[in-house]
Image (cartoon, grey):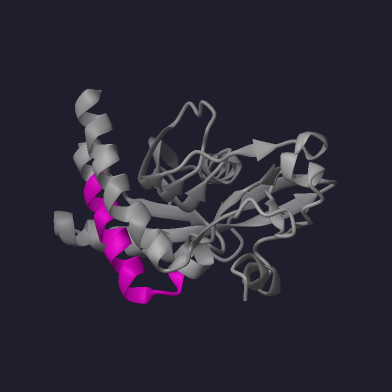
Amino acid sequence: MERHSGLEDHMNNIWFPRIKEVGAFWTHSGIASHPHIWTTLKNHSNEYFNGYVFGQNSPLLDEACKSLASFLVLRFPEILDVDRIIGPAMGAICIADGVARHLSNIRQKPCLSGFVEKEENNGKRRMVFKRMNIYHGETVLIVDNTINMGSSVHLTAEAVKEAGGRVLPVFGAIMNRSAVSIKTRIVSLAHIPATQWKPNKCPLCAKNSEVIEPQLPRNWKRLQGL
């Protein structure tokens, strides 16, 4: 375990500075007049990884997918035998494709990729295969651009199982923000646990800092001070 922890620290020391360098990671300044963000679970936070901003840098994204594929194989050699890489749309489509491509090069045998999409029915959220299918019995590795509480990757796993696939007990991600125990192992290039507060206990709200949705382009500009 210490060897693995050392590897994870090494990857984090390489990739977190590069993520910040391209402006894909935001941290609140501490100034009350500056806005902060809410998360997908409607908690509040003072940090955010923008996977879409990171993904706009195609050479860096390709390098990240190559590094993630190699790191996954190093940690879990059984990944060499996986049939397909699946990611939740939209953010992880390119991640799944890139990891599958580089895994194909590593093992000198094609690896398929694919994605699932959100669907809501009576207020219940799930992931489904809307535009593609997987083959029954396929072994699948699930990846995402970022993992917070793990809801998207777990819903993706459910979709794969419902379609007849076998899910490997490991998730791959560019950024791991989880600060809680997730039963499935996560292999990531960077791990920065998220600080989150319930809205009624948010210290930034107590200072009258405005809370905004970070994924909206106009709001991301505001967070960057543009």
Q: Quadrant of the C terminus?
A: bottom right
Let me know if residue 15 appears in the view: yes
Left/right of residue 225 with respect to residue 206 in the rendered view: left
What residue is shown at x 43% (from left), y 38% (from top)?
167
Left/right of residue 81 with respect to residue 39 in the rendered view: left
Given residues 49 and 70, the one toward you in this image is 49
Outermost front residue:
31
Could you say where residue 89 lies in the image, as x and y percent from the top left? 56, 61
Outermost top residue:
1
Could you say where residue 217 lies in the image, as x and y percent from the top left? 65, 73
Could you tell me what secondary structure mostly forms the magenta stretch? helix
Given residues 24 and 137, the one toward you in this image is 24
As for residue 65 lying within the magenta part, the answer is yes
Could you say where residue 214 lies in the image, as x and y percent from the top left? 66, 61
Left/right of residue 9 with respect to residue 74 in the rendered view: right
- What's the magenta region? 55-71
Q: Residue 223's image quarter?
A: bottom right
